[in-house]
Image (spheres, rainbow, N blue to C red):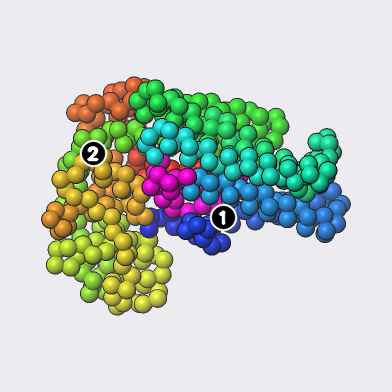
């Protein structure tokens, strides 16, 4: 598993699985609970009021979780799996392997989350209306008012907020899908990304004068829009390039019978992060540098066999394929290495580093078409290659709840 992903998981706790999707809560979520308790304490309210406030926040994030599950289940309908859902203080993130490329399907997946919040709002409104328990909205606040009515209003806010055209939020994805039905996908992504960055600026300005929490949202939206735009640029840039032109043929391998001491020696003597485990020329597994860091050596000692710590699933592409196939596989991989095979035998490796280098060299020499209208020339080509190198996981599709 790549270091970046390990860092995320390191600070997250798994709550369980719902509908086959792993659900995690990030450690920073505790800061939100602590901040809420501090607010109640400073307002001089008692322990019971603080408990009620925390309960409301947990119920609200339960609705956020349902929002993300809406995305996940809608995506599953179109054959797209969801790696996991992570709950953060700013909301939820559903990490989809990819988005459906058909604009209508992407639109329906994006609409699924806000639709869940809309459904929760409708159910709570009907219950409160039938019970004649609706209070004037002027009596409500974040910390005061009937529990169910506050939850109802919060879900309406979540649905409306996520429909803002701030790519990669739901509204931004709906905008891209609408544009992609009328123009080329990468061009639609570029427009949606620029609109998202504009919304991020507005969030930032509002955060300076109103709620500082919007500053964090502005940062997330700006970063997400930039990353996803870069991922689409890279995907278009690799179109038609054979995997064999990018793969490295100078690499180290391991045998299942090798010791971890031998594996450690190879990682220390070379820049190769991931080591293919090969048996009679056929790749059977992959041992990553992160696997060694995660306790392999401490558990088994340096003489422990590699076979006990091999990654059971490997990502491979045939040398005859193009990067249009290989690049999405590399992005979806837990590691940063894609194995290249020919007739089942290992013949090369593709990593984010050599892919970025190849893109920069290829485009600087003018041997590939410009990936998007706003980018041209060697400087822009270098920008694209560097963006792939600096953010290898940028192509992950995420939905912000």
Q: Nearer the viewer, residue 223 or 329?
A: 329
Q: Which residues are magenta?
A: 74-99
Which residue appears at 20% of the width and 37% of the height?
Answer: 241
Q: State whether residue 378 is above or below residue 41.
A: above
Number of numbered discs overlaid on the protein picture: 2
Identify the residue at image location x=37%, y=23%: 183
Tag 2–tag 1 contact (CB < 8 Å): no
Residue 384: percent from left, percent from top: 33, 33
Secondary element under disc 1, as helix, strand or loop, is strand
Q: CA distance from mark 2 to mark 1?
A: 36 Å
Is residue 294 visible in the rendered image? The answer is yes
Q: Is residue 129 left or right of residue 172?
A: right
- Disc on res. 332: none
Task: Pinpoint residue 49: horizontal percent, then vertical percent.
Answer: 82, 55
Give the position of the C terminus as an image quadrant: top right
Q: Which residue is mark 2?
A: 358
Is residue 401 rendered to the left or right of residue 370?
right
Tell me which corner region of the image, top left, top right, bottom left or bottom right, holds residue 300.
bottom left
Q: Secondary structure at mark 2?
A: helix
Q: Say if the magenta span includes residue 364.
A: no
Q: Quadrant of residue 220?
A: top right
> Where residue 258 sits: x, y (%)?
23, 73
Q: Residue at x 56, y 61 (%)?
A: 15
- Residue at 51 percent of width and 52 percent of height: 85
Q: Name the one closer to the observer, 92 or 45.
A: 92
Between discs 2 and 1, the one toward the N terminus: 1
User: In which quadrant will I find the N terminus?
Assistant: bottom left
Q: Which residue is mark 1?
A: 26
Relative vertical location of residue 32 with respect to residue 180 in this rendering, above or below: below
Q: Nearer the viewer, residue 145 or 346?
A: 145
At label 2, counting other C-alpha atoms closer than 10 Å, the crowd grade (few under 14, some 14-19, many 20 or more) is: some
Residue sticking out furthest to the front: 130
């Amino acid at each position: 598993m790549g270091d970046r992903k390990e860092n995320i998981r390191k600070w997250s706790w798994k709550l369980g699985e719902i509908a086959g999707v792993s659900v995690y809560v990030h450690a920073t979520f505790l800061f939100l609970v602590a901040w809420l308790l501090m607010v109640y304490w400073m307002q001089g309210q008692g322990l019971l009021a603080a408990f009620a406030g925390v309960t409301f926040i947990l119920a609200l994030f339960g609705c956020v979780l349902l929002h993300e599950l809406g995305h996940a289940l809608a995506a599953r309908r179109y054959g797209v799996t969801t790696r996991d859902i992570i709950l953060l203080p700013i909301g939820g993130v559903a990490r989809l392997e990819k988005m459906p490329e058909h604009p209508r399907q992407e639109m329906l997946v994006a609409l699924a989350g806000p639709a869940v919040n809309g459904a929760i709002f409708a159910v709570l409104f009907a219950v409160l209306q039938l019970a004649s328990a609706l209070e004037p909205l002027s009596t409500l606040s974040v910390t005061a008012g009937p529990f169910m009515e506050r939850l109802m209003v919060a879900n309406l806010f979540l649905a409306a907020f996520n429909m803002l055209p701030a790519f990669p939020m739901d509204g931004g994805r709906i905008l891209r899908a609408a544009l992609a039905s009328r123009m080329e996908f990468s061009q639609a992504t570029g427009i949606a990304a620029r609109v998202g960055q504009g919304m991020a600026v507005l969030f930032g300005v509002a955060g300076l004068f109103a709620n500082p929490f919007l500053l964090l949202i502005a940062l997330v939206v700006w970063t997400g829009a930039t990353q996803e735009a870069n991922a689409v640029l890279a995907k278009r840039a690799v179109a038609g390039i054979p995997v064999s032109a990018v793969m490295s043929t100078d690499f180290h391998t391991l045998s299942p019978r090798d010791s971890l001491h031998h594996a450690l020696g190879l990682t220390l003597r070379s820049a190769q992060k991931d080591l293919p485990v090969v048996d009679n020329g056929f790749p059977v597994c992959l041992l990553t540098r992160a696997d060694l860091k995660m306790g392999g050596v401490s558990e088994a000692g340096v003489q422990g066999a590699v076979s006990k710590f091999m990654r059971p699933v490997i990502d491979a592409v045939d040398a005859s394929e193009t990067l249009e196939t290989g690049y999405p596989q590399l992005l979806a991989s837990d590691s940063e290495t894609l194995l290249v095979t020919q007739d089942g035998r290992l013949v090369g490796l593709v990593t984010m580093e050599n892919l970025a280098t190849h893109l920069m060299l290829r485009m600087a020499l003018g041997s590939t078409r410009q990936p998007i209208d706003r980018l041209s020339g060697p400087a822009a080509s270098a920008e694209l290659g560097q963006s792939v190198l600096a953010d290898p996981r940028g192509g992950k599709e995420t939905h912000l709840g």
